[in-house]
Amino acid sequence: MKTASTIEPKDIRDFDSLYEFIEYFNNEKKCIDYLAKIRWNGKPQCPYCGCDKSYRIKTQQRWKCASCRKQYSVRIGTVFEESRIPLRKWFIAIFLFTSHKKGISSHQLARDLKITQKTAWFLLSRIRKLFEPDPNEQFDSDSVVLIDETFVGGNDRNRHKEFKVGASKKRYENTKLPVLGILEKQGKVYAVPIENLKNATFKRVMQKKVKEGATIYTDALQAYQQVLKGKYKHEFVNHAADEYVRGDVSTNELECFWSHFKRTIFGVYHHTSEVHLGKYVNECTFRFNNRKLSEGSRFDVALANSKGRLTYKELTSERYGQKEETKEKT
């Protein structure tokens, strides 16, 4: 994922308010030019052959490749491709989505942009694609890392009769979805839904995201102690004994992130399915990791990561969640 430091154009505007934002983007041409600056930094690249020599057809707001001779717009190869929604509405939606601390529902966005709820839901799903974390990014071996898990889902007593799992089951087994969080102290957070709380699951995620030798703070969950032993400098606090802080050892920063995450789910979206839970997790991690940026800079970071297209057929496919799970396991 691109960050604020990797956005090169120096003539990019910073916006402090929605009013200033709408005043500036008062026509479609400004949106096209702004997206071109963020995406190409003055050097358009053909999405078909990769050639960096193109000339602009100003009357059509398109470019033509000097090599393959194909015409293309700034939308090709991005989440905006094949969308009939004007870029002005897309930009407003991204600004609202990134600036609202706990997101915005598809019903509210539909009213704000004067579009249908179905269109707003699809639009928000495509915007969430901008928030996907870098799969190759790792926490360094000299960093201090906090690890904790949380559970997403309603109480069993509130379920319909055919979906109740019964009191014989463990408290969270088959009733809630676990999410694992890894946070660098005073730094970024990475969170991902996991299938269970078994050692093999923790081991797979740890090998992928945290380099050996790092200092790790957790709670007293037995699985952490077994997986982290010998490879990491491990300290933990025992919540069962009312121990939440011991010197510098605690998971409080990560608990703060979970608090915002839960309030986003409960207060705005109310419900998330297992298939799409990872997208909501990525949304919250993006806001947390870019919380110190200005409203305009956060919008620019999201726009800079707009590469990649998500179709409605793919989004609504039953295999969509399976693809995400398979991607996490590899």
Image (cartoon, grey):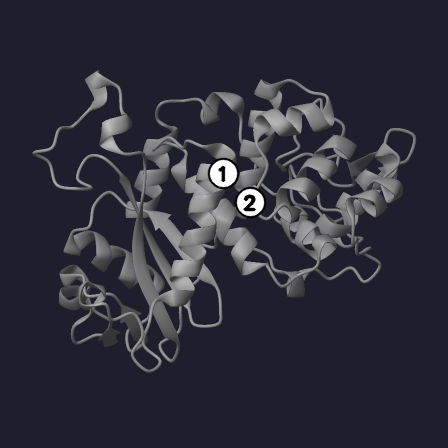
Q: Nearer the viewer, mark 2 or mark 1?
A: 1
Looking at the rendered image, the quarter that the N terminus falls into is bottom right
Q: Circle 2 sits on which residue?
A: 102
In the shown orientation, is residue 88 left or right of residue 260?
right
Q: Which x, y percent locates residue 68?
A: 71, 36
Q: Circle 1 sits on which residue?
A: 267
**Element at label 2:** loop
Residue type for callout 2: Lys
Q: Nearer the viewer, residue 162 or 94?
A: 162
In the shown orientation, is residue 72 left or right of residue 27?
left
Residue 128 visible here: yes
In the shown orientation, is residue 147 left or right of residue 166?
right
- Residue 7: mark in rendering: none
Residue type for callout 1: Gly
Mark 2 Cα-neighbour bin, 10 Å: few <14, some 14–19, many ≥20: many
Mark 1 Cα-neighbour bin, 10 Å: few <14, some 14–19, many ≥20: some
Q: What is the residue that sits farthest to the front in this orientation? A: 242
Residue at the image point whose x is 19% and y is 35% from the top: 174
Q: Nearer the viewer, residue 9 or 60?
A: 9
Q: Is residue 328 above or below residue 154?
A: below
Q: Which x, y percent locates residue 140?
A: 40, 73
The answer to whether mark 2 and mark 1 are in CB contact below 8 A is yes
Q: Which x, y percent locates residue 208?
A: 32, 60
- Marks 2 and 1 sit apart, C-alpha to C-alpha, by 8 Å
Residue 82 visible here: no
